[in-house]
Amino acid sequence: GGWDVKREDAKRASHHTETKEEAVKIAREIAINQNTELIIHKMDGTIGERNSYGNDPHPPKG
């Protein structure tokens, strides 16, 4: 069980945690530091949440 943190192109997780909250905290710090997008998947593998950090190629209008 537990939660994995990994880059989209990675074969293996860079971190493994017991809780989703801990995994999201680590992943958010990595995404902010690397100016990338954070994608949080649900247990079934579908995308639950997306957050962009840095240069967003599709900023919201308005």
Image (spheres, helix red, strand yellow):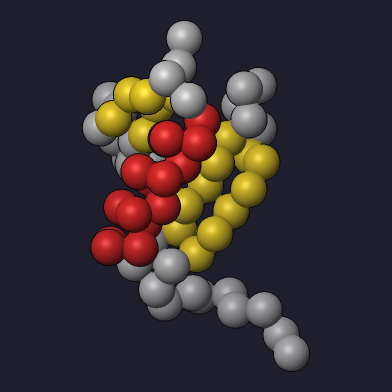
Instruction: Look at the picture and state if 7 lies above or below 61.
Output: above
| Residue farthest bottom in this picture | 62
> Residue 36: horizontal and vertical position, in percent?
38, 61
Horizontal relation, residue 28 to residue 30: left or right: right
Please name whichever residue, 28 or 59, is drawn nearer the observer in this view of the structure.
28
Residue 47 appears anywhere in the view? yes
Quadrant of residue 16 within the rendered picture: top left
Which quadrant of the figure contains the C terminus? bottom right
| Residue farthest right in this picture | 62
Instruction: Look at the picture and state if 44 lies above or below 54.
Output: above
Residue 11 appears anywhere in the view? no
> Residue 49: horizontal and vertical position, in percent?
63, 48
Q: Which residue is drawn at the image coordinates 63% and 30% (left, top)? A: 42
Q: Which residue is drawn at the image coordinates 59% and 79% (left, top)? A: 59
> Residue 30: horizontal and vertical position, in percent?
31, 52
Horizontal relation, residue 32 to residue 38: left or right: left
Q: Which residue is drawn at the image coordinates 55% and 41% (left, top)? A: 40
Q: Which residue is drawn at the image coordinates 64% and 40% (left, top)? A: 47
Please name whichever residue, 40 or 8, is drawn nearer the observer in this view of the structure.
40
Quadrant of residue 29 within the rendered picture: bottom left
Instruction: Look at the picture and state if 38 lies above or below 58.
Output: above
> Residue 56: horizontal and vertical position, in percent?
49, 74
